[in-house]
Amino acid sequence: MPIRNNTDTRIRTNVIPVRVYAQGDCPCANSFLRDGELYASLYPQEDMPVFRGRGFLLFDFGKEMCGGIRIVYHRSPRPAKIRIRFGESVGECCAELGHKNAGNEHSVRDFEVTLPNFSDSVYGDTGFRFVRLDFSEDTEYMFYGVRAVSTHWEAVREGAFVCEDALVNRIYDTAAYTCGLCVQTQLWDGIKRDRLVWIGDLHPEAKALYCLYRDVSPIRDALDFAQSLSERAGLRWVNGIPSYSFWWLINLCDYVEVTQDKEYLREKLAFAGDILSKLDVCVDSEGRFDPGNEDMAYFISTDGTNGLSCFMSYYILKAGRFPSTRQEGYTRRFRPLLL
């Protein structure tokens, strides 16, 4: 995991804007596209971007990233407020809060700050490609420059896929990049929202990571975290959802199969056995799985049975990959599902 012993091992990379997508009353906007080191000082620099009055800038950083924006600022005659909006699209970057679900849930992406004189500061921590700056005061703004600060996992991607279809190759590269981008302080569901470990949603992410990286420790860390959270919060089920307890078992089986870490499997047997015991009492004599009202409504099939959970019961137990499922006490209750 990128956080070990309270030390953040993620890499922070400064990214220059690839273009000014739009601007209003900012005649020297392209000055922000210059390469070179940025630093604050007491003295102005030649050709530095200076704006007078109200206006806006919309930067395109070329690709999706997780992080914030670094603003290196010289000074203003009086306190200078700006509004910062992050967006994965131009439309989101220009939207008002509440418009088409634009919001600040999970990570704040729309806020106002006062720029200190002679400052070098990073603002925001979210998922974005575009950043819009709105100048709120009728005063002079003097910048040294801006950079996106991209925070990402240090592991090297080793898996690859290439075919004759350029579009398919681009889709693969984008999917692989997005998956790696979700490895932050934990293996998140998403870099903007949800910044949470959903153990069911983690399954396709884990499948991708096995193909892309030699280091698959984030998957193990996610299994540990989901177990620890469930135990500390006094939850009956992983993530508080019966079917996600199935997915915890499935993810554990996949992890051990890929890594052959039998010692880790032995560490998890007690917790896994506890899950199976809870699942066992939810299965009737005909093999139907019914956790009551604890599962999410969208797991209920049209005929009123919990179809997805029954399928996962079948998937886990028929595979027989988990030692506890071979015990007669479990296989007898789930036997109808194994036929």
Image: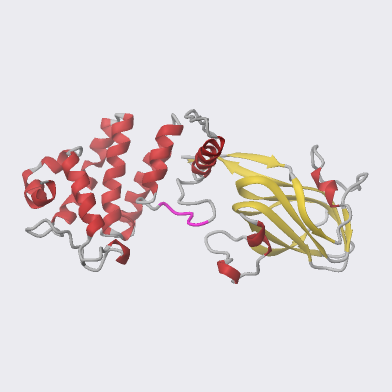
Identity of the residue furthest to the front in this view: 164
Residue bounds of the magenta highlight: 193-197
* Placement of 25 over or under 203, stated as above or below: below
**How many numbered discs sit on the rendered protein?**
0
Pick the residue in front: 41 or 191.
191
Q: Where is residue 65? Give x, y as percent.
A: 60, 46
Q: Is residue 311 magenta?
A: no
What residue occupies the far right of the structure in this picture?
A: 46
Q: Position of residue 329 (x, y in %)?
A: 7, 48
- Kindly identify the residue that appears in the image at 28 percent across and 44 percent down: 250
Q: Is residue 109 above or below residue 74?
A: below
Residue at horizontal 83 percent and vertical 68 percent from the top? 137
Q: Looking at the picture, does residue 34 appear above or below residue 119?
A: above
Residue under the image location 51 percent in, 31 percent down:
157
Give 263 or 284, whichever is nearer the viewer. 284
**Residue 287 picture quarter:** bottom left
Is residue 221 left or right of 181 when viewed as pictured?
left
